[in-house]
Image (cartoon, rainbow, N blue to C red):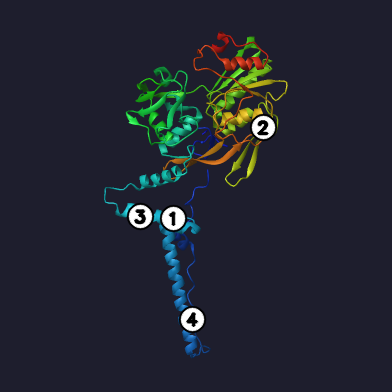
């Protein structure tokens, strides 16, 4: 995200995400009717009675001026009424964009007042308009979500959801870059089944290309739309048509369940000399669990660490900051650049557990390491605090913010900023290049891990044995 910096765990509040991700809500201005009701009524004209009140003759010129004044007043009144009616029929439209929005409101009124093909659900029309605006950006990381989909997506980022338990991405054929919409050159690819989840048990593998969901082609749809079809209530079944290599497509029926991914896995390697922490996501819980695991290792006297970010798609940037601060005593974790080019540094929090330079750190990355994973890895690489080992990372350098909409209209996530490494590198669609590149042939047996072996060598320890790697 994983999805822009979320400051709260409240799922209804704006949540900036980096991985798979809030401007003020327009339309809260008082209506013209409210303004009229609040205004004081005009005072009645004063009436003078008494001997001093003598008749006065009104000249032709004075009469003409008075008539012109009345006409001008009437024109102003009518003009104000006309503007008031326009504002009332285009609520929330900025005054300086009235002309630009005329076609929109004309189309909306035509649909809601004249469409004869059946009943018009105003809410559905409005949701479609919002979806169309965001889709027009052509940004695979910005999207409109229905009320139910919005809640599901935030649950996914939090590390728990109902579905099949697989990380899925839209990848461009030949380059592996993010893309939209899905089609012949933009595939829906399983990047990682969650260990022990329904997809894993049913035989879904990393690299599988999903071409159909319950018999319906994914072509022409957005990734979010199709992921929401894959997710669903516990106990229900979804059937995926999967292309795997050059073999004929196969269908896999999967019974959905509640998936609570274990985001932090830790163990000791090299006879207890190296602390190994595998991080699968960047939720609020994962950052706390990471600190707990690191604290136990530091207290046990370990001075060498491997942080494994392979296959980690990202999450909340606050989690990336908290984890990065365990290794960096000061300075930026990352820079955030908004739409106007303003740059703001997000600094390391004080009190990190492993900021001592004598503690050696290696970070493992691959093409599945994205977003918040790249923030963490980039920060440790730029500051020379860690050695990156593995393959070039995914390359997602943008931050998304999650915005709930009123009246149960769902919400959207919108790219609101770029993020840059401490040295102000923008790695979008480029990725991070490891300090030590390790090629892993597809034929490598699952009991072997050349990347982990190389990391141990970098730390000055022997390669991991089969027992170590599988422990």
- What separation in Å lies between label 3 and label 4 (alpha carbons)? 49 Å
Please state which of residues 67 and 227 is positioned toward the viewer in this rendering: 227
Q: What element carries label 4?
A: loop
Q: Residue 349 carries which label?
A: 2
Q: Residue 101 carries which label?
A: 1
Neighbour tally class for label 2: few under 14, some 14-19, many 20 plus, Cα within 10 Å? some
Disc with the residue nearer the chain's start (4 vs 2): 4
Disc with the residue nearer the chain's start (2 vs 1): 1
Q: Is mark 2 on a helix, strand or loop?
A: loop
**Does residue 148 show up?**
yes
Residue 317, position as x, y percentages in the image? 58, 33
Residue 456 in the image: above or below residue 400: above
Q: Tell me if label 1 and label 4 are in contact, CB under 8 Å.
A: no
- What separation in Å lies between label 4 and label 2 (alpha carbons)? 73 Å
- Identify which residue is drawn at 55% across, 24% down: 366
Q: Which mark is residue 109?
A: 3
Disc with the residue nearer the chain's start (3 vs 4): 4
Q: Tell me if label 3 and label 2 are in contact, CB under 8 Å.
A: no
Choose mark 4 or mark 2, whichever is in front: 2
Please state which of residues 12 and 125 is positioned toward the viewer in this rendering: 125
**Does residue 325 show up?**
no
Q: Is mark 3 on a helix, strand or loop?
A: helix
Disc with the residue nearer the chain's start (3 vs 2): 3
Residue 334, position as x, y percentages in the image? 63, 35
Please state which of residues 47 and 182 is positioned toward the viewer in this rendering: 182
- What separation in Å lies between label 1 and label 4 (alpha carbons)? 49 Å
- What separation in Å lies between label 3 and label 2 (alpha carbons)? 52 Å
Q: Which mark is residue 47?
A: 4
């Amino acid at each position: 995200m994983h999805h822009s910096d979320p400051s709260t765990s409240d799922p209804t509040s704006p949540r900036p995400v980096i991985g798979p991700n809030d401007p003020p809500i327009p339309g809260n201005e008082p209506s013209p009717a409210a303004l009229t009701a609040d205004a004081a009524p005009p005072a009645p004209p004063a009436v003078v009675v008494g001997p001093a009140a003598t008749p006065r003759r009104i000249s032709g010129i004075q009469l003409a001026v008075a008539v012109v004044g009345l006409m001008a007043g009437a024109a102003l009144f009518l003009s104000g009424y006309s503007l008031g009616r326009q504002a009332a029929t285009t609520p929330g439209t900025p005054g300086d964009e009235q002309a630009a929005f005329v076609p929109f409101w004309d189309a909306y009124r035509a649909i809601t007042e004249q469409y004869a093909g059946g009943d018009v659900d105003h809410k559905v029309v409005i949701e479609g308009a919002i979806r169309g605006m965001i889709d027009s950006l052509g940004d695979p990381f910005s999207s409109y979500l229905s009320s139910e989909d919005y809640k599901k997506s935030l649950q996914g980022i939090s590390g728990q959801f109902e579905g099949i338990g697989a990380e899925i991405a839209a990848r461009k054929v030949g380059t592996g870059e993010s893309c939209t919409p899905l089609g012949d050159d933009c595939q829906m690819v399983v990047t990682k089944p969650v260990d022990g989840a329904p997809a894993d048990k049913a035989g879904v593998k990393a690299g599988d290309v999903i071409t159909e969901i319950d018999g319906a082609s994914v072509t022409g749809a957005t990734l979010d739309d199709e992921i929401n079809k894959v997710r669903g209530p516990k106990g229900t079944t979804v059937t995926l048509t999967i292309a795997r290599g050059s073999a004929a497509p196969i269908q896999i029926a999967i019974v959905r369940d509640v998936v609570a991914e274990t985001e932090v896995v830790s163990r000791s390697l090299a006879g207890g000399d190296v602390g190994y922490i595998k991080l699968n996501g960047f939720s609020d819980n994962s950052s706390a669990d990471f600190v707990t695991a690191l604290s136990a290792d530091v207290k046990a006297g370990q001075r060498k660490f491997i942080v494994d970010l392979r296959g980690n798609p990202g999450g909340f940037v606050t989690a990336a900051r908290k984890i990065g601060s365990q290794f960096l005593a000061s300075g930026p974790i990352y820079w955030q650049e908004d739409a106007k080019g303003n740059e703001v540094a997000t600094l390391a929090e004080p009190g990190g557990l492993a900021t001592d330079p004598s503690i050696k750190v290696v970070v493992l990355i691959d093409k599945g390491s994205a977003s918040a994973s790249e923030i963490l890895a980039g920060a440790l690489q730029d500051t020379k605090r860690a050695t990156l080992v593995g393959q070039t990372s995914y390359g997602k350098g943008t931050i998304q913010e999650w915005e709930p909409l009123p009246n149960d209209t769902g919400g959207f996530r919108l790219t609101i900023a770029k993020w840059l490494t401490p040295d102000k590198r923008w790695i979008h669609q480029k990725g991070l290049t490891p300090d030590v590149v390790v090629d892993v042939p597809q034929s490598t047996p699952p009991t072997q891990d050349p990347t982990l072996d190389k990391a141990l060598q970098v730390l000055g320890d022997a390669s991991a044995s089969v027992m170590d790697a599988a422990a």
